[in-house]
Image: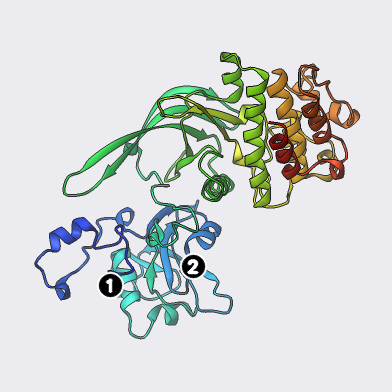
């Protein structure tokens, strides 16, 4: 592949610092990037990634291109085109007997419904890139040209404006060690695990990181979309608002079955576990809610609907300073969206007890329904009771439909201003609920 200008290349592009050491003394005109041994080793191969995420995250300028696979495992070349609006084009690559030469039984790579072929994906793309007549445009009848490959780090160009995808894909099972079972959920199984990072250089180094690994029961195109959507939302929150907001997503492992998502390990578990195991007074419980309200306020400005707010989805870690302090993270973003509304089937939602009554008729989650759920989250933290605790799970939606105005009593041990705030947040009329900005301001004014 062509050597990029050293002024615009990053340390992850060829030639890397290790390559430069090996090339020392050789004239630049003789520098040649060695062909990768497999598709997985191509630096602009991203693994299994949905097309919408490629378009959203990676292809910025006409001529940007990369290799990836879909849920169907079909290899594709994605390119930002020169056509009106600069849409991305995704070319499926097949490996087949092309029979372009009589008696040739060899298998070749080629873009579907085109002529140019090669025994190697790398060489196929190289041929298109170095073509003086832009054979890619001629073969595909699309206004495209291969100008610059996009690596997972995106050339480290956008580190100040968006999150980095570097190291977000676990590409081999040797990179993790799955440990003890934590729990079995409705759609997944969760384990403690260790991730290994290998830094290749003149001296190879391996570092370890403890993670929580969620193994998904479903392995579908919809699940792949869900995992990348969750990753995008959480990484956006942490980049825009700060790291002490949402529990980190460390990586996805989707190269085979089943699909996995890896989270940062919080040493104290969920907020419910933390409250049960420790004596936390009212003032400190209010401080916990204050931190959560602050994060939710910033999330709603993006805007983001969480869709599954409850104390079970708040996690507690301890910092590594000399004076250990708890850090509270919002998790459970699997149902979140970057939007002001989300169409849902209430019967399929995981947080039915926290559901605002209007969702049963509108079939929409909104920023206001998140405010309602936060009211019950506050109630959980203040009382250690779940919403509608005497009602069985199977009857909960029917109960909410028949009793849209029934709420529990907030104990008198809770400060009057906070009792008032909880009651305002879970009012049945969504138009009368306060905005999260108001909720956050009330915590600031009273704490």
Residue 288 in the figure: left or right of residue 77: right
Which structural element holds mark 1?
A: loop
Q: Is residue 375 above or below residue 145?
A: above
Depth check: give the residue in front, 386 or 371: 371
Left or right: 73 as drawn, with respect to 436: left
In the rendered view, does 36 fall on the left or right side of 253?
left
Residue 66's place in the image compared with 237, above or below, is below
* The quarter of the displayed image where residue 205 is located: top left
CA–CA distance between discs 1 and 2? 20 Å
**Is residue 105 at least partly visible in the picture?**
no
* Disc 2: CA contacts within 10 A as few (<14), some (14-19) or many (>=20): some
Mark 2 or mark 1, which is nearer the start of the sequence?
Answer: 1
For residue 60, which numbered disc appears in the image?
Answer: 2
Q: Residues within 10 Å of mark 1 (few under 14, many from 20)?
A: few
Residue marked by disc 1 = 2
52 on left or right of 301: left
Q: Is residue 396 visible?
A: yes
- Residue drawn at (37%, 58%) of the image: 45
Closest to the camera, between mark 1 and mark 2, is 2
The percent coordinates of residue 212 (x first, y second) are 46, 31
**Which residue: 53% across, 57% down?**
53
Is residue 358 placed above or below 111 in the rendered structure? above
* x 54%, y 34%: residue: 217
The N terminus is located in which quarter?
bottom left
Q: Position of residue 438 (x, y in %)?
A: 76, 42
Q: How many labels does the image show?
A: 2
Q: Residue furthest bottom?
A: 133
Residue 446 picture quarter = top right
Which structural element holds mark 2? Answer: loop
């Amino acid at each position: 592949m062509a050597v990029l200008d050293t002024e615009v290349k990053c340390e992850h592009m060829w030639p890397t610092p290790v390559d430069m050491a090996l090339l020392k003394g050789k004239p630049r005109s003789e520098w040649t990037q060695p062909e990768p041994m497999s598709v997985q080793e191509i630096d602009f191969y991203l693994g299994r990634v949905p097309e919408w995420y490629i378009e959203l995250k990676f292809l910025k300028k006409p001529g940007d291109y990369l290799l990836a696979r879909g849920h169907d495992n079909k290899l594709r070349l994605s390119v930002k085109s020169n056509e009106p609006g600069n849409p991305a084009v995704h070319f499926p690559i097949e490996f087949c007997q092309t029979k372009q030469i009589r008696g040739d039984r060899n298998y070749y790579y080629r873009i579907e419904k085109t002529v140019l072929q090669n025994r190697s994906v790398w060489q196929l793309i190289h041929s298109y890139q170095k073509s003086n007549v832009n054979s890619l445009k001629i073969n595909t009848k699309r206004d495209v040209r291969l100008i610059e490959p996009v690596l997972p780090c995106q050339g480290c160009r956008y580190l100040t404006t968006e999150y980095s995808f570097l190291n977000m894909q676990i590409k081999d099972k040797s990179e993790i060690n799955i440990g003890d079972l934590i729990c079995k959920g409705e759609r997944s199984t969760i384990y403690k695990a260790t991730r290994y990072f290998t830094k290749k250089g003149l001296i190879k180094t391996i570092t370890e990181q403890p993670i929580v690994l969620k193994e998904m029961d479903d392995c579908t195109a919809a699940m792949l979309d869900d995992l990348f959507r969750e990753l995008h939302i959480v990484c956006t929150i942490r980049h825009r608002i700060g790291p002490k907001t949402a529990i980190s997503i460390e990586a996805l492992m989707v190269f085979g079955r089943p699909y996995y998502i890896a989270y940062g390990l919080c040493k104290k578990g969920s907020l419910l576990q933390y409250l049960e195991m420790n004596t936390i007074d009212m003032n400190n419980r209010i401080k916990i809610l204050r931190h959560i309200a602050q994060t939710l306020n910033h999330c709603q400005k993006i805007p983001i609907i969480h869709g599954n707010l409850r104390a079970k989805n708040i996690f507690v870690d301890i910092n590594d300073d000399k004076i250990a302090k708890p850090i509270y993270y919002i998790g459970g973003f699997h149902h979140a969206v970057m939007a002001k509304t989300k169409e849902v089937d209430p019967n399929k939602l995981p947080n039915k007890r926290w559901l605002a009554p209007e969702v049963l008729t509108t079939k929409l989650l909104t920023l206001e329904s998140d405010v309602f759920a936060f009211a019950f989250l506050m109630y959980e933290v203040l009382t250690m009771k779940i919403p509608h605790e005497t009602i069985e799970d199977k009857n909960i939606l029917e109960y909410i439909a028949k009793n849209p105005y029934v709420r529990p009593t907030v104990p008198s041990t809770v400060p009057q201003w906070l009792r008032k705030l909880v009651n305002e947040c879970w009012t049945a009329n969504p138009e009368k609920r306060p905005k999260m900005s108001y909720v956050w301001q009330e915590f600031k004014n009273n704490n």
